Amino acid sequence: MAITKESIIKALSTVQDPDLKKDLVSLNMIKDVSVDGNAIHFTVVLTTPACPLKEMIKTDCINAIHKHVGEDVQVFPNMTSDVTSTRNTAPLLPNVKNIIAIGSGKGGVGKSTVTANLAVSLAQSGAKVGLIDADIFGPSIPTMFNCEHEQPEVKEINGKNTIIPIEQYGIKLISIGFLTPPDNAVVWRGPMASSALKQFISDTDWGELDYLLIDLPPGTSDIHLTLVQTIPVTGSVIVTTPQKVALADAKKAIGMFKQPQINVPILGLVENMAYFTPAELPDNKYFIFGEGGGMKLSEQFDIPFIGQMPLVQSIRESGDSGLPAVMKDDVTADAFKELSQKLARQVAIRNANLAETKKVEMIN
Amino acid sequence: MAITKESIIKALSTVQDPDLKKDLVSLNMIKDVSVDGNAIHFTVVLTTPACPLKEMIKTDCINAIHKHVGEDVQVFPNMTSDVTSTRNTAPLLPNVKNIIAIGSGKGGVGKSTVTANLAVSLAQSGAKVGLIDADIFGPSIPTMFNCEHEQPEVKEINGKNTIIPIEQYGIKLISIGFLTPPDNAVVWRGPMASSALKQFISDTDWGELDYLLIDLPPGTSDIHLTLVQTIPVTGSVIVTTPQKVALADAKKAIGMFKQPQINVPILGLVENMAYFTPAELPDNKYFIFGEGGGMKLSEQFDIPFIGQMPLVQSIRESGDSGLPAVMKDDVTADAFKELSQKLARQVAIRNANLAETKKVEMIN
């Protein structure tokens, strides 16, 4: 019996995407099926290049064809990706597929460190990534990307003055830190800060992006409201430490995103500074800030627990020296890579199951 | 020769206050001199009950009298204190002698922990202490004082509805945390938050206080501007960790207080989470967040370096359990006590050398 495209598609329709819980064919993830004698070629379009299940899905495809089409065929799956989006028809930044806000409630829990490493790790996987440092009063991103002295160009595009983001490590970046001298305090009331954020969104040349990450400031005030009133946010990530006072503030951030008028899906919770391990005592974990608080919080609010990062001197050093930890070749790099894959999965799951987030109307 | 009051005063006029660099008599610190045969009694009125030089000044007084009046007299100095102030004629809260804002620029550096321990330590020394938790979006003070479920009374005083602060460990406290459910986010734009702070200052029954501490939120925005526009602040304290991104934000906080229109004296800089020492390796100091950054910053801006607090699990646990570390009997308690004494000294030095801080007129 000749091998037909139809028989291959039928075989592949038995393979499930474990996250999206549907088969690859129904999910429109199979393209370009071709048969050349015994050789079977097809393309699997994953929902993100950072897909942690890539190898598993590939193996599942090969096995399904061997089982349903024949043991003696040669299977050549071409694994590729096209990041999903619910924003294709959005009035603002329709070429930005996903906007992800990273918040914490409390400052100093490592939100910028997590954001910087997520950005680099997603870019390393092949995604197009941008990052807005929305912490107008304490911008850390320029330091963490070793570009504190860069100044973005402003170009006229379609008759509008447009900021060209700084590019570093393949990521497009914008921060108030590029626009003000580093030692100067930006002593602004809320409306001034909000107008800076609006410019970072509306008057910046972001081009095409798979993921635009937004590093939020602490609190639940002007910047947060302005963000969700300016552009619908695909989803949010909550960073906390296991400390009671940090968890309390993380609850407030969760509460904000869950408010019915705001209603931004929460994609995951990250526990940072989970424990400290001295180099001399590699088996000791010092739970300086307490133990298990992040996991408990994620269970309480039914939020995916997507990562537990240790308190490691090298992560802090990497941030201070402007070379994010994930760019090094060590265990912390692996941990951040895994975190970014889990986040990318949650984005894909969210896009498959939920409609576009709605812009928030004026509140307060 | 009979011993006279004059000879005693003359002897005591040779004793200097090491901080204020003048003699005790000129400083009006000697009261109630009396001579009863060989017994000499007098009162030394120090500038703060938390004076770390109390014993030294007492010994200096005894020695001066032995030297200038006679070896064979018995000297009974009565060491007491009356906290100095530049606010006696202030239009708002004239009975509050000193208003001290504790800021950091960056969140999560332990500002609330330092503030809580300073408050308790000053109160333990005998001072009358109040504390405003000005972090409207992340109030930690109720947790740190184990009074999260308290609700302040509101009483009509002189025809005005007045909030009665919560009292815990001898300290008068007010926080947005007493007025809103703990899990709820206060999602407010700046003006709402500012109006809460104004009520905490103007519509709260603070009575007589030696020190009113104000735990500021991160950043340099609405709350900070509203504070200095509502009530002149005696002085500020900057808390930082040695981490580069924290130091960068601390510089911004310093920059804000030093702005000519704001001009709040900076009383001291505290480096928190300076190093971690595991119980099993008591000689090891892990400079997880970097080394020496606080000291360098204080030198750069000519700010007194008033303390270096280690990263100690028990300090965090104390905060989470609501019993500030300084209330325990251990080395961290001693460190916080020393910190509070150094701060009290700096307040006295500031009051001796500078006029009252001026209220800030509208900026931005």
Image (cartoon, coloured by chain):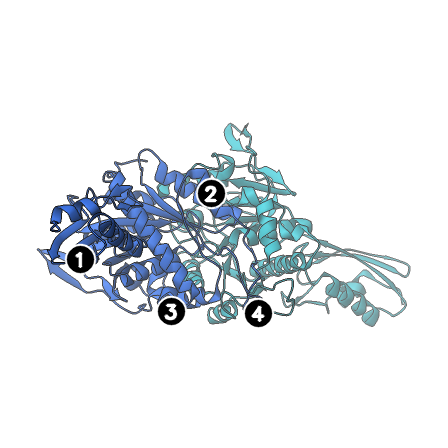
Chain colours: A cyan, B blue
Q: Quadrant of residue A55?
A: bottom right
Crowd around label 2: few <14 · some 14–19 · many ≥20 (10 Å): many
Q: Give the CA distance from mark 1 to mark 2.
A: 38 Å
- Depth check: A95 or A300 in front? A300
- Depth check: B99 or A21 in front? B99
Residue B205: numbered disc: 1
User: Which residue type carries mark 1?
Assistant: Asp
- Depth check: B132 or A197 in front? B132
Q: Dot 2 corresponds to which residue?
A: B297
Q: Dot 4 corresponds to which residue?
A: B280
What SS does tag 1 mark? loop
What SS does tag 2 mark? helix
Q: Dot 3 corresponds to which residue?
A: B328
Q: What percent of the width, then of the height, locates residue A265? A: 49, 59
Protein chain holding label 3 = B
Mark nearest the camera among 2 and 4 is 4
Protein chain holding label 2 = B
In this image, A187 relative to A273: left or right?
left
Mark nearest the camera among 1 and 3 is 3
What SS does tag 4 mark? loop
Q: What percent of the width, then of the height, locates residue A295? A: 52, 69
